[in-house]
Image: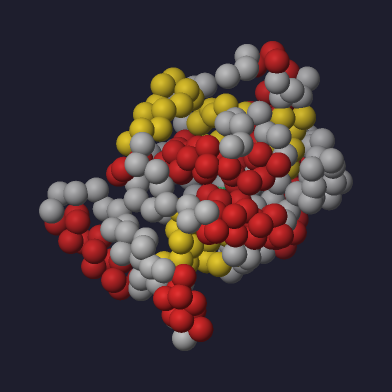
Amino acid sequence: MKSVSEIPVRVRYAPSPTGLLNLGGARTALFNWLFAKKEGGKFILRIEDTDTERSKKEYEKNILESLRWLGIHWDEGPDIGGPFGPYRQSERLDSYEQHLKKLLSQKKAYFCFCSKEQLEAEKQAMLAQGLAAKYNGHCASLNEEEVEIRKKRGEASVIRFRVPQVEVEFHDVIRGKIKFDASLIGDVVIARDVRSPLYSFSVVIDDAAMKISHVIRGEDLLPTTPSQILLQKTFGFEEPRYAHLPLILGQDRKKLSKRYSDTSLFEYRTRGYLP
Ligand code: GLU
């Protein structure tokens, strides 16, 4: 791995516009921005709106306005563009499609037709045996004809990444050495179909395409890191450095959430707080 001084620092704040910007999000943005400033790097704002049901334009607007109010300005972003745009994931579907098709054609990903009920029953059975719940690979060896027939019949499907059964080890800038046994993860869902990727897939493609050097984000996303690293390896992408920040908790020791606490940044503004 190259030393920090050798790589141009490019960090991103990548919110999903599924709620108003809260303190936790603002802090993640602040850490990224400060780090970029300190290192003379670039701070990128990327809107992760692949969840079409929960993403809303009004939330995106609120996030941008809240960051501006705080005085956090980005060098590249959905409103100002930049050399690696577009910076809104819903405008990058061609790239995800191309990468998903590549994985499917190399059999590193496959279509899965298991129903929610079936998956839930399997999960409960595994938990009852004291095992880590993971997908049992039921659809992992369906052949192409079978897949075609079932799709033509209109059966609902998702795309799973064939997670290599290896140990994943990485150095987290904050937490030090982290090791995961990928055989405990199972084949994760990465998309609903080739034009409908999930966050954990699109994030990998975009971090590589936007040449992100450091991924600084909340530690609630730590469990998603091993499969993201395995996807990077599969595509031959360079691995960014990771820094998972501890979360800000409420007085009840629970994570601040968009739904349960009144911590939207603009509420503070309304109450007269200064940025
Ligand atoms: N879009 C993700 C979220 O809002 C964050 C992605 C990331 O920082 O890797 O939770």
The image quarter containing residue 121 is bottom left
Horizontal and vertical percent position of residue 93: 69, 60
The image quarter containing residue 40 is top right
The residue at the far bottom in this view is 153
- Note whether residue 49 is visible: no
What residue is shown at x 39% (from left), y 43% (from top)?
A: 164
Seen in the picture, residue 216 relative to 86 is either above or below; the reply is above
What residue is shown at x 35% (from left), y 46% (from top)?
A: 185
Quarter of the image where the C terminus is located: top right
What residue is shown at x 36% (from left), y 63% (from top)?
A: 141
**In this view of the protein, which residue sits in the foreground, 194 or 248?**
194
55 displayed left or right of 176:
right
263 displayed left or right of 58:
left
Horizontal and vertical percent position of residue 17: 64, 56
Quarter of the image where the N terminus is located: top right
61 displayed left or right of 182:
right
**In this view of the protein, which residue sits in the foreground, 252 or 77?**
77
**In this view of the protein, which residue sits in the foreground, 215 or 186?**
186
Horizontal and vertical percent position of residue 106: 52, 54
Seen in the picture, residue 131 relative to 226 is either above or below; the reply is below
What residue is shown at x 64% (from left), y 60% (from top)?
A: 97
Q: How many marks?
A: 0
